[in-house]
Image: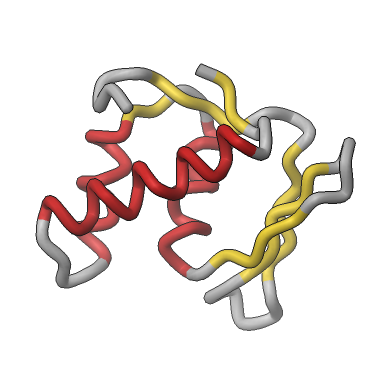
């Protein structure tokens, strides 16, 4: 994935947080497909919901919140975006 491509969450995506807010579920309201989300996934989803953002920006956010290397953060972000793309829940 191109690190400078801008992505956003589709309107069909619904995020349901657990009571403690540290995890949740992403639901596709058209298909009822869903996936569980940890705190990093929720951080990415919140940024995507606000509007167009890049892998580079998302990676920096993950690094700020966690003690991980650039390569690990970028792989995690890219892998999650691929999952969202395969679920047809993000716009390019």
Q: Quadrant of the N terminus?
A: top left
Colour approach in the figure: secondary structure
Instruction: Tell me which residue sits at (39%, 20%) in the image.
Output: 6
Report x, y in % for residue 75. 27, 50
Furthest residue in direction front, as rendered? 86
Report x, y in % for residue 3. 25, 27
Instruction: Tell me the quarter of the picture where residue 91 sits.
Output: top right
Give above or below for 11 relative to 83: above
Instruction: Tell me which residue sits at (46%, 68%) in the image.
Output: 39
Q: Total of numbered circles in the picture? A: 0
Report x, y in % for residue 36. 64, 66
Give above or below for 83 relative to 42: above
Instruction: Tell me which residue sits at (53%, 27%) in the image.
Output: 8
Instruction: Tell me which residue sits at (52%, 58%) in the image.
Output: 42
Horizontal side of residue 25 vs 78, given as left or right: right
Horizontal side of residue 40 vs 21, given as left or right: left
For this rendering, which residue is in front, 50 or 74? Answer: 74
Report x, y in % for residue 28. 79, 44
For this rendering, which residue is in front, 27 or 47? Answer: 27
Give above or below for 70 relative to 49: below
Horizontal side of residue 69 vs 23, given as left or right: left
């Amino acid at each position: 994935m191109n690190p400078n491509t801008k992505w956003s969450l589709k309107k069909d995506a619904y995020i349901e947080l657990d009571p403690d807010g540290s995890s949740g579920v992403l639901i596709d309201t058209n298909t009822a497909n869903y996936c569980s989300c940890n705190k990093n996934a929720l951080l990415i989803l919140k940024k995507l919901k606000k509007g167009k953002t890049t892998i580079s920006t998302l990676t920096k956010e993950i690094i700020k919140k966690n003690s991980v290397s650039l390569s690990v953060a970028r792989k995690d972000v890219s892998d999650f975006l691929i999952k969202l793309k395969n679920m047809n829940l993000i716009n390019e």
